[in-house]
Image (cartoon, grey):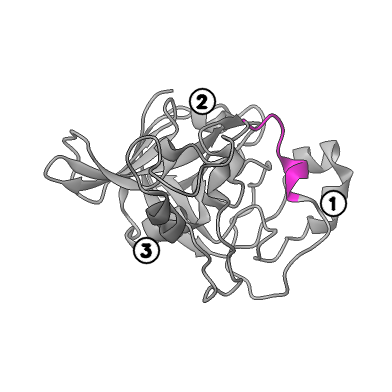
Amino acid sequence: MTRDRGEAGAPHARDRHTQDPHTQDGPRARGLDRRSFLVGAGAGLGALGLAGCASDGLMLAEATRLYGPMPDEKFPIPAVDISKVDPKYYRRTVQYASQEAPGTIVVDPRNYYVYRIEGDGAATRYGANVGREGFLWNGNAYVGRKSEWATWTPPKEMIRRQPEAAKYARGMPGGLDNPLGARTLHLYQNGAYTLYTIYASSEPDTIGSGITSGCVGLLSQDMIHLYARTPVKTKVVVLPA
């Protein structure tokens, strides 16, 4: 697997990494605008009509169900504004030829998809955003650790660029404003953390786009769906971009 170590690789679009985050109870963090960590995110599509189907066959009602609110979470998650997501990035089961075992995760950064192999030529496909590290890093890894509502600590490089992030130098508690999101899969090789992650994003207009830095993000509802089906030690294949 290869990755660029020049600037510290962040596990999220907002330059988050360097600390091994841990789950932490605490009040919702406020202050920094989540958008301050995003630059050049691709614009989403215009609003979809309230009747009929999405362009590739998924009924709008089904998308609304998949991406509805999750009030029972530790920090209740609001519904996704699906008008900001191209329907081709909605979660669905697709035909996907692979020699990998069921349960394996395949990241396709070139096409902004993450697949979970289901077997018999099928996979669950999720739309994703991909940061700079996601395009530079490829190969085989495994899920070495899983986090729910993890603490995020901004790297020193980010603090130098964005001094307002210094207030979280000792960590931002988990919450809706936390760049790590509701769930994170931390990828390892040979017992070492690679700094590459698959994480939960609450920015629907970034799905299907490249963003400034970070790894691979799924909509929170999709990430929770994948996380629940992914045990530690699961194989992850990151395809070349």
Q: Quadrant of the N terminus?
A: top left
Q: Is residue 115 left or right of residue 69?
A: left
Give me the C-alpha separation between circle 2 and circle 1.
27 Å
Q: Amino acid at mark 3?
A: Ala
Residue hosting label 3 = 228
| Residue 203 drawn above or below residue 206 | below
Of callouts 2 and 3, which one flags the residue occurring earlier in the amino acid sequence? Answer: 2
Residue hosting label 2 = 136
Q: Amino acid at mark 1?
A: Ala
Of callouts 2 and 1, which one flags the residue occurring earlier in the amino acid sequence? Answer: 2
| Element assignment for label 1 | helix
Q: Position of residue 108 (x, y in %)?
A: 38, 32
Residue hosting label 1 = 166
Q: Position of residue 204 (x, y in %)?
A: 57, 45
Q: Residue furthest left?
A: 120
Query: Magenta region: which residues?
Result: 34-42
Count of marks placed on residues: 3
**Residue drawn at 46 percent across, 56 percent down:** 64
